[in-house]
Amino acid sequence: MVKILIDGASILAIDDEVRYVSRGYVYLDGGRVRSLGQSPPPEEFLYPELLLSGAGRLVTKGFASGFTVLSLYPLRYGLDDVDWFLARELFKAIKRGDMYYIAVLSLAELVSEGVTEALVVDVYLDDVARASRDVGINVTLAPPLNCGLDDQRQLNELKLLLGRWHGRVEGVKVGIAVCRELREEHVALAREVGLPLYALELEREPEKRLEGLRVVAINPLIDVELPTIYSGGMIQKWREGGGLGVGVRPSYSVREAMKEALWSRGADPLSVLLSGTRTTSELIDQRESSALREGSRSSIVVYNLSEPPGWPVPRSLQSAVRAVVEGDLPIETVVVGDEVVLDREGLLTVGYEVFKKAIGKFEELYPTLPPLLSRL
């Protein structure tokens, strides 16, 4: 377990309230925030295994994507949103082993954009779990049912996830996703295995009360009282207290989704920041890393504001929040758990050879895609 000290940084500490420390420190030990406060740090924290200079840096919690589809990532420049019909056509062409490499590429881009937690609704999620472990990002994996795919295969995937990952590997959680309606058999299954239920594009309210079951709506087509996550074109319906997701988009960036929520809804930047960080992390069952406070699991992004385009370093809570939400601050370091996942040299967890192989695999696959997909 690596002991890490970030000293002399500006800090946006996210807890029940958000506070700004103009010159502070964060001490990480065992994958958790052991201490956070005003510099200089107490003497017991002065001799870490890794010391990161905070001069000209802004430290805060990483972003969370509340709805992410990785399999369509190679086609993202041709899509405006998630299309399960196109996904089904793609799944006919790709093999299970291909999904690991697609997931590595897409998860690496998420990390490079400062995303430290993501809800992934997709196929071959056992391979996505392996990729998330290798990349170093926290994930909640939800096989989709009643979404036009093969439900029996998704149920088999759910069994794999429960047997290999859920409750066994830190940072990997499992849920169940459903499309359009909350069927009784899916509600019963979620209760039986004790997992949250993510309801995509609900078309009608559930007929029965959902006591004892955690349900989160994603891009509902009707007004619901459920906790809600918005992505794609539905971000224009975002409301305070809701979460945000990237879905499928040219840039797998929660920062871009936050800007859309801010400008389309005329929202307060602090509310949008909390939506893209703490709120979404909590909604996707990643509560341990949903805050930047003492005791929380490390989920940290360090921005370098020592020169343009980040300079100058903010001097108040309001300006720091606006810098993160509205600015384009360069991300220098990402720490998840007890691992430095990204630094100024790039991703540290997965090497160039893996990326090269991943890109090569899809270049081989692309000519074999159905005509509808190869045009995207």
Image (tube, rainbow, N blue to C red):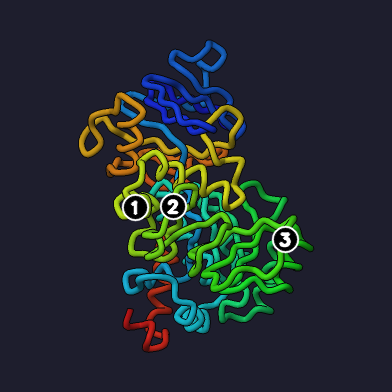
Under circle 2, the secondary element is: loop
Q: Which residue is mark 3?
A: 162
Q: Which residue is mark 2?
A: 239
112 vs 289: above or below? below
Under circle 1, the secondary element is: helix
**Mark 3 touches mark 2? (CB < 8 Å):** no
Under circle 3, the secondary element is: helix
The residue furthest right is 192
Q: Which mark is residue 265?
A: 1
**Mark 1 touches mark 2? (CB < 8 Å):** yes
Question: Is residue 159 in view?
Answer: no
363 vs 258: above or below? below
**Residue kind at label 3, given as amino acid type:** Leu
Graded by Cα atoms within 10 Å as few (under 14), some (14 to 19) or many (20 or more), the crowding at tag 3 reads: some
**Mark 1 touches mark 3? (CB < 8 Å):** no
Q: Residue at x 31, y 38 (%)?
A: 322
**Residue kind at label 2, given as amino acid type:** Arg
